[in-house]
Image (tube, helix red, strand yellow):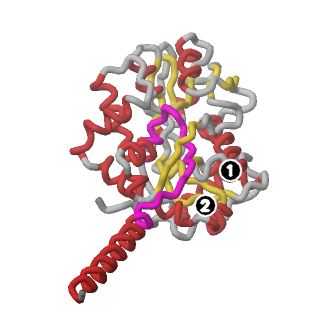
Amino acid sequence: MKIGFLRGRFLTAALALVLASGQYVAAATELMPVNIGYYPGQIYTTIIWVSQVKGFYKEAGLDPTLISTANGPLMNSELASGAIDLGINAPSQLGVAREQGLDVVFAAGNARIPWVLVARSDVKLPHKGKYPDVIGDLTGLSWGVYGRGSDGELFMRMMAADAKLDPDKDIAWIGVGGPATGLPALQTNRIGAYLTLEPAPIIAKSDGYGQIVIDLRKGEGPGDLAGIVYQGIEARRKTIAERPEIFRRTIKAHEQAYCWIKNPANFDELIFILKTRIPAGNLNDEQFRAMVQQNLSDFTLTFPRAQIETWSRLLVSHKALKSPINPDEILWREMPQQDPKC
């Protein structure tokens, strides 16, 4: 009887231990749902794609749903409606959203400035390599932008002002959309110059109808834009206040993705991932790999306060915003202060 009693006590204790262990495992692996807005076909979405494909979101305790979003204003609309919890956006779009009453902030950084100015290959550029004189070579051409009032137009207006051109009198502005519609507009001479993003510049160049005029990624163009962080992870302040763990876990996943991307041993797999997500036109493998390699240094998880101050000055002086941005109001206190040391 005593043996049976002890055996019963042992089985009961063991069962309790199993149940407790099961509860612990369930708690430890419970995934928090999160809706993430992203821009399809754009290389600066790489950290998000890698976090999803490599399982870094799930390792950090997130169950992500990626939601394709066409542009910055729509990203703000998705945040306002609650369709997404976080997305990628630029200070210009964040500032406009705040002036319209949407209280949004940056939880982390994402990428440095990625824009490239392309002109038709038959445009004569006697001042090529000499900024801002080369911008004057584009006088008389139609300048293509993703949309009127877009970041692309803002940057092109800055270049025009540096070249002593009047952006409202000397330039014909045409909204041609992203690469899917913008490149055909350049190819058919509907526009003569186009500020765009990878892979559009290398496609235009490799197909023979475009030439690179200014590469902002390399520090060319306006000095204030050299190396500046262009995008951050944007969210409503209310969402961060109510569900801060989502953003802590997102940052953890993005840190893993950042280090994975930076590891040369993963480059071939990275190319495989990006080829399924970035339309590459007629680019061959070598060209695609070179394009990706050139952009690897642009990723970041920080958004320095001083750069927000620079953005604020630029946006107000060029009348993109009515009043300055206060960095203390838009930078989450738990934002990474430096990139991971991988």
The foreground one among 127 and 104 is: 104
**Above or below: residue 302 compared with residue 41:** below
The stretch in magenta equals 26-47
Q: Quadrant of residue 128?
A: top left
Q: Secondary structure at mark 1?
A: loop
Residue 261 x, y percent position in the rendering:
32, 47
Q: Which residue is mark 1?
A: 82
The foreground one among 109 and 64 is: 64
Residue 334 x, y percent position in the rendering:
52, 69
**On the rendered structure, is 338 left or right of 289?**
right
The foreground one among 222 and 256 is: 256
Label 2 environment density (alpha carbons within 10 Å; few <14, some 14–19, many ≥20)? some
**On the rendered structure, is 158 left or right of 290?**
right
**On the rendered structure, is 200 left or right of 16?**
right
- For residue 309, the mark is 2
In space, the residues marked 1 and 2 are separated at their CA atoms by: 29 Å
Count how many numbered circles sit on residues in the image: 2
Amino acid type indicated by mark 2:
Glu
- Quarter holding the N terminus is bottom left
Query: Residue lying farthest front?
Result: 1
Label 1 environment density (alpha carbons within 10 Å; few <14, some 14–19, many ≥20)? few
The foreground one among 58 and 211 is: 58
**Above or below: residue 178 compared with residue 315:** above
Residue located at (38% from left, 67% from top): 22
Residue 49 x, y percent position in the rendering:
43, 42
